[in-house]
Image (cartoon, rainbow, N blue to C red):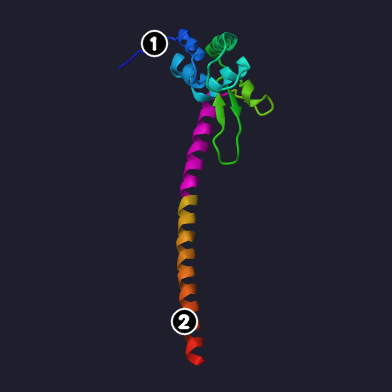
């Protein structure tokens, strides 16, 4: 049966005013203001506003800059142009619906086929998870063998010491 998509939760720009209070961190306030906003996009809003993700209190100018950059990013998300940001070998790349100025332009790869990019990211994530599990298994096996060899070496050394003591 067809189930309609629920409407998106409303964006609460008034919650940005709480950044004027001490010890408020912009990423957490932004993520509360926009349900579904991930950490990468929250950091992008902060970078576009030209501020840092540090505890407040924040000035009115900073709050206004964050509000402007959030509204511009939300507008940009209405018509996404996906970009893939490669990362270290074995680590899944970051797939973003928009260009991230906080990541730099040189590493960005525009995505023509969003479905292929999603499949690639998921495949890399699964591969890195599997590889990580294999690494842990190999390291554990090597650690047990090393412990066994140390015990054998200690036993041989103790036996040799006892033999030398008897022969004197």
Badge nearest the viewer, 1 or 2: 2
- Residue plotted at (46% across, 81% down): 159
C-alpha separation, residue under disc 1 versus residue under disc 2: 77 Å
Quadrant of res 67: top right
Whether residue 122 is situated above or below residue 70 in the rendered picture? below
On the image, numbered disc 1 is attached to which residue? 7
Who is closer to the viewer here, 56 or 6? Answer: 56
Image quarter of the N terminus: top left
Q: Secondary structure at mark 2?
A: helix
Dots 1, 2 in contact, CB < 8 A: no
Instruction: Report the residue that reaches farthest toward the right.
Output: 106
Q: Give coordinates of residue 75: x percent, y percent.
A: 55, 9
Disc ID at residue 58? none
Image location (x, y in percent) of residue 122: 49, 33
Horizontal side of 36 relative to 44 (left or right) equals: left
Q: Secondary structure at mark 1?
A: loop
Callout 1: 10 Å neighbours few (<14), some, many (20+)?
Answer: few
Q: Nearer the viewer, residue 98 or 115?
A: 98
Residue wearing tag 2: 159
Look at the image and say whether residue 121 sits in the magenta stretch. Answer: yes
Circle 2 Cα neighbour tier, 10 Å, few/some/many (<14 / 14–19 / ≥20): few
Picture residue at 58% right of the left edge, 12% below the top: 62
Segment colored magenta: 113-134
Where is 1 relative to 122, above or below?
above
Q: Is residue 43 above or below residue 123?
A: above
Residue drawn at point x = 49 percent, y = 87 percent: 165
User: Along the horizontal axis of the image, is 19 left or right of 47?
Assistant: left
């Amino acid at each position: 049966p067809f189930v309609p998509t629920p409407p998106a939760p409303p964006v609460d720009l008034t919650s940005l005013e709480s950044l004027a209070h001490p010890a408020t961190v912009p990423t957490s306030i932004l993520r509360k203001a926009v349900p579904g906003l991930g950490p990468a996009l929250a950091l992008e809003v902060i970078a576009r506003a030209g501020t840092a993700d540090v505890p407040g209190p924040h000035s009115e100018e900073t709050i206004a800059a964050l509000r402007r950059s959030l509204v511009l990013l939300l507008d940009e998300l209405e018509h996404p142009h996906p970009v893939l940001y490669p990362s270290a070998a074995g680590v899944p790349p970051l797939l973003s619906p928009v260009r991230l100025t906080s990541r730099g332009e040189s590493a960005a790869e525009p995505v023509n086929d969003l479905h292929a990019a999603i499949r690639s990211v998921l495949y890399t994530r699964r591969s890195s998870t599997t590889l990580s599990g294999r690494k842990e298994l190999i390291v554990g096996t090597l650690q047990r063998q090393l412990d066994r060899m140390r015990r054998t070496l200690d036993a041989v050394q103790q036996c040799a010491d006892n033999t030398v003591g008897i022969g004197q």
